[in-house]
Image (cartoon, grey):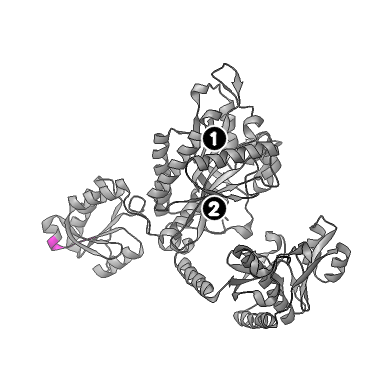
Amino acid sequence: MADNEHDIPFKDLPPEERLFRMRHSAAHVLAEAVLEMFPEAKYAIGPPVDNGFYYDFDLPRTLNPDDLVQLESRMRKSVKANLPITGEQIPKDRAREIFKDQPYKLELIEGIEDDTVGHFKHGEFQDLCRGGHTETTGQLGAFKLDRVAGAYWRGDEKNPMLQRVYGLLFPTKEELKAYEQMREEAEKRDHRRLGRELDLFHLDPIAPGAPFWHPKGTLLYNGLVDYMRELYVEYGYSEVVTPQLFNVDLWKTSGHYQNFADDMYMFESDDEEIGVKPMNCPGHCHYFASGHHSYRDLPLRLAEFSRLHRNERSGVLHGLTRVRAFSQDDAHIYCTPEQFDQEIFTVFRMIERVYGDLGLGEPTIRLATKPGKAVGSDEDWDHAIDLLGQSVTKAGKEFTLAPGEGAFYGPKLEFHFKDAIGRSWQLGTVQVDLGMPASFGLKYIGEDGAEHQPMMIHRAILGSLERFIGVYIEHTGGHFPLWLAPVQAVVIPIADRHLDYAGSVRSQLRDRGFRVEVDDGPDRMGAKIRKAQLQKVPYMLVVGDREQEEGAAAVRDRTGDDLGAIPIFQIGDRMVDERDTRTAQAR
């Protein structure tokens, strides 16, 4: 049996491992069903994923919804048969013979460095696989074939387009149903749809992976930047702007050329190789190295919002959450070893404050350790991991390990939060850099008069602003807190004779710093209120004869609740309090 994977009875495995094996085995059963239905099919890969499984196929025709019904029926027959799933390691030559008519399997075989490969089968079906399965096909749990999508082989647009069949799988029918209900809610909150409906941004093939921010979206974007800049003053950060283009020598010094070049945009200019920056840290290190520093200058906290570009493959681009052009609330802290713990604690406090103001709640923390491709010795990594772990513990917090998921230059803390419908997202990161301070020859003069190498901390709280806004739109459903809402109030005149007064109300509130519009269109009042609600505007201020006489407005909030007629100055006071204390939490 490959990897002795059935040495422990399936029922005695941890729940996470059982679920992984259910989903992995379901992918095999799906491939079996497809090959029964299309004997000439070429099958590629079929891994488990967070909500189920998928498998990629090269088929003679495009699948339709009726095909999924038939395939699911075939899968259930295999489940009912309760066939044993067995596996072993076999020589590559034998695997090549078994899969001689399967080009994708043959390519996978050639890419495996070992002399043997994993071979699994149940019934007449056989597959190339590393293992991790149930004991039988009857242990799959509750599943449902979900949809078909196109997927380039190995995510590369230069490769053939395959058909990817997705399935959902959970241990019980109740959990499957709960997931489907959650997904229905997620579809309502999809940031790409809300981005169009709220006139925030759009995406176009003319600029793949680079959003066009509309005026309202730009207000939201700049609102977050302005908010972080306010905190930078309070927390002692200095903002800089470094170049977009650097000679390749910088990227070789930083290690990105050796470890990250495939994800960068590189080009030739006047016989020079130039790289468009995908992150700010090398530029910040160059800045630090260009000056002379004493221990009295540290900690030095450098922040930057410059545009960054990464060569993400087209197959993985997704709305705002996976883009090629973006900005980060990016900062790098250079400090002495004695200052390290205090700097980490301060970052923790800053993260708690930002997430609280945004209504995100308490994050959970993961400590990501050394990946396969990394700079620095194992000893250095162990020391840095200990430092980060101890800092979390000293701050009275807990963390879990994420083995192998650190950056190539050092371990990192990841801050995850659950959104309004229970999905987990990674936002902030705190990283210790094991390579760049030495690579750039960074030094400061210590209290002893000698040169010392500073410690370097990478820190982002929101992360990519594009990705954060995509996540935040879905978390709030577009109901942004007042201080961030692109339009904070709409004045709705009942009749044309109230237009001048509506303009006066707008002016009074604008004078107090609010973003206010007047809906002077031809629609009736009810339609205008409905439109403002659909636009998720926090306040609707209806004005007619009575309100005009009293210097007031009939106030409705975005839920449609009628708060009654309130004098304009009191409306302003209420909005100032809500904005400045950020009392309105995301919904």
Q: List the residue tagged with mark 1.
A: 242
Q: Does the magenta stretch include residue 71?
A: no
Q: Does the magenta stretch include residue 542?
A: yes
Nearest the camera: 312 or 498?
312
Q: Where is residue 480 in the image (x, y as percent from the top left)?
A: 37, 56
Is disc 1 placed on a helix, strand or loop? loop
Write the residue at 54% across / 53% down. 210
Q: Where is residue 260 in the image (x, y as percent from the top left)?
A: 67, 44
Q: Position of residue 570 (x, y in %)?
A: 18, 51
282 versus 75 height, above or below: above
Q: List the residue tagged with mark 2.
A: 210
The segment highlighted magenta reads 541-546
Is disc 2 placed on a helix, strand or loop? loop
Left or right of 46 on screen, residue 171? left
Question: Which is nearer the N-term, disc 1 or disc 2?
Answer: 2
Quadrant of the drawing holding the N terminus: bottom right
Nearest the camera: 456 or 364?
364
Left or right of 337 on screen, residue 56? right
The amino acid on which the numbered mark 2 sits, given as a three-letter code, is Ala
Asked if one can make out residue 147 in the rendered structure from this viewpoint, the answer is yes
Nearest the camera: 332 or 27?
27
Q: How crowded is mark 1: few (under 14 residues within 10 Å), some or many (20 or more)?
A: some
Write the residue at 44% across / 62% down. 194
Mark-to-mark CA distance, 1 and 2: 21 Å
Nearest the camera: 15 or 404?
15
Q: Quadrant of residue 73?
A: bottom right
Q: In which quarter of the image is residue 82?
A: bottom right
Quadrant of the drawing holding the C terminus: bottom left
* Residue at the extreme top of the image, as rendered: 449
Left or right of 197 on screen, residue 416? right
